[in-house]
Image (spheres, rainbow, N blue to C red):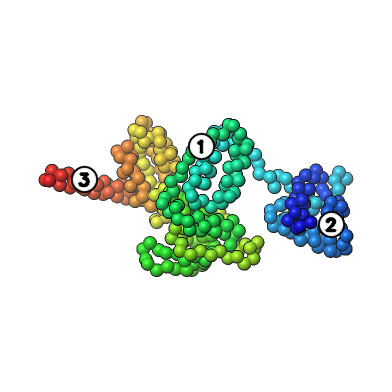
Amino acid sequence: MERTERLLDLVALLLDAREPISWAELREHFPADYGGISDDAAERKFERDKAELLELGLPLTYIQGDDDRKDGYIVDRSAYYLPEANLTKEELAVLYAAGSAALASGAFPGRDDLAHALRKIGFFAGDALPSPRVRMEVGSAQSDPELSARLEQLWEACASHKWVQISYGSPKRAEVTDRKVDPYGLALRRGVWTVVGYCHLRQGLRTFHVHRIRELKMNTARPRTPDFEVPAGFSLDAYVAYYPWQHRFHEPMEVTLLLRGDAAPRAASLFPGATVEPAEDRVRARLSVTYLEGLLRFCLALGPDCRVESPEPAVTRVREMASRILERHAATEERKVSA
């Protein structure tokens, strides 16, 4: 029997077992593999198979029997199987639509796995699942055929914890630098793919926009052995911003906003993560900001329904920005009148 087939049969046998399977029983189930050879050779062969199953994530353990149970190998099903998601029909439809949109984008890592997952969702939901016609707008860079290949490589490198060698171009300088990077994670934010990892050149964590990578090579040596471990507590959200005020340009600052009118009931969705408190016919929102300019531009776009209350430097800065906008509009109107 081929090794891959034997490993699959081993997994199937162990998962189907209701009690531990002894070494003698394993030899009986696989006479062509563990039988017909010496005991030492059979044990060494099984140990190699067991090591590969453990490396693949199968929680295989050997237990000592007692009065109620015999000695043998067993798989912890609670550690092997994922818990039931128990999604509603509406949640399944949203998940299916989001996955379909990702596939339709033209460049999305793990496309084969995603397509397989969508087929499972479709099979489970049956007629209850609509066939959404969705489209994902993620920027013109998605049409670049090289982007898709790089995303797949980075996806594989992140999953297998293998370092990558990249040639990276800066938007501010013409030169290209060669970097060895341990990729910790890959994220899509506002149409831009970003990889976050440890840069050996800079000796620290850095973010890299995938569309600026000119060349990319993943370390293929010892493919089953990870090159690094992702630090405990690492979070992509701490390095790749969802919103303009989350860019890590400055030290965190707590800003208080007062929202009224149409903006008041939307405070939680406009500023996710903010502490929202009702204040008569208005709403007060407090949030941590690491890029004040980004927040103030967003607030000005909301118009008079959003006012910056504190701290004083934020209030002063938003007034300066608003004054410049008014001056530009006034100058434009003067030119129109004089024309």
Residue drawn at x 74%, y 59% as measured from the top left: 51
- The residue lying toward the viewer, choosing from 37 and 189, is 37
Instruction: Give the crowd class for mark 1: few <14, some 14-19, many >=20 residues within 10 Å.
Output: few
- The residue lying toward the viewer, choosing from 65 and 125, is 125
Establish if 220 lies above or below 144: below
Q: Amino acid at mark 1?
A: Pro
Residue drawn at x 21%, y 48% as measured from the top left: 328
| Secondary structure at numbered mark 1 | loop
Q: Amino acid at mark 2?
A: Ala
Q: Earlier in the sequence, mark 1 or mark 2?
A: 2
Residue 132's disc is: 1
Q: Position of residue 326 (x, y in %)?
A: 22, 45
Q: Position of residue 278 (x, y in %)?
A: 40, 34
Q: Earlier in the sequence, mark 3 or mark 2?
A: 2
Q: Position of residue 102 (x, y in %)?
A: 50, 46
Left/right placement of residue 143 relative to residue 111 reads left
* Mark 1 to mark 2 CA distance (whole Å): 50 Å
According to the image, label 2 marks what residue?
32
Q: Position of residue 324 (x, y in %)?
A: 24, 49
According to the image, label 3 marks what residue?
329
Q: Nearer the viewer, mark 1 or mark 3?
A: 1
Residue drawn at x 76%, y 57% as measured from the top left: 2
